[in-house]
Image (cartoon, grey):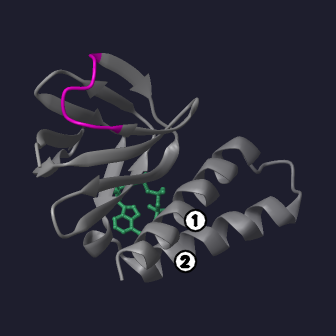
Amino acid sequence: MSTMKVNIVTPDGPVSETDANMIIAVTESGEIGILPGHIAMVAPLQIGELRLMMDDSTEHIAVNGGFLEVRPDVVTVLAQSAETASHIDIARAKMAAKRAEDALRSKTDDVDFKAMELGLKRAINRINVYGSGQ
Ligand code: ATP
């Protein structure tokens, strides 16, 4: 089966460099599947799960927004942060989810609701991706 190079990069450095048969990503306009030879494009990503399908395994990656850039021979994901399932600290993600939920419930004026909602989304995504990687 043909493959394409996939590079996932964050401001902290590369997270994953691999060859995949297919990529499934959650873009702002919905889930898309990319196969080798896909036409060039750039798409903004949601906080969501990126799946890299290989011959006999799938890598699950929690991606925090950013962009997916498809070129004929390489796909690059530029994300604010990204963690492969095996690098997710599940206790930290559960704590972050609880912290955000408590803050959203508190209804005090000094809570930045948008920031807390995004924090909760990132934490739930990490919890889900960790589960997919088990
Ligand atoms: P927290 O409140 O736990 O810091 P956060 O969503 O605010 O979570 P980010 O700002 O998205 O964290 O990420 C900061 C850095 O910490 C990034 O390098 C990210 O990959 C890493 N990170 C955040 N949460 C986790 C986690 N649960 N497991 C592993 N790495 C994490």
Instruction: In the rendered structure, find residue 124 and report the number of the disc placed on it.
Output: 1
Of the four image quadrants, the one with ligand 1 is bottom left
Q: Quadrant of residue 98?
A: bottom right
Tag 2: Cα neighbours inside 10 Å, few (<14), some, or many (≥20)? some
Examine the structure image and report whether residue 45 is included in the region drawn in magenta: no
Question: Mark 2 — residue?
Answer: 94
Question: In the shown orientation, is residue 4 left or right of residue 86?
Answer: left
Question: In the shown orientation, is residue 105 left or right of residue 9?
Answer: right
Question: In the shown orientation, is residue 56 left or right of residue 25?
Answer: left
Q: Quadrant of residue 52?
A: bottom left
Residue 26 percent location from the top left of the image: 49, 42
Q: Secondary structure at mark 1?
A: helix
Q: Determine the residue positioned at 22% across, 33% down.
A: 76
Which quarter of the figure is the C terminus placed in?
A: bottom left
Q: Which residues are magenta?
A: 34-40
Q: Secondary structure at mark 2?
A: helix
Establish if 89 lies above or below 67. Answer: below
Residue 1 percent location from the top left of the image: 11, 49
Q: Determine the residue positioned at 52% across, 40% down.
A: 46
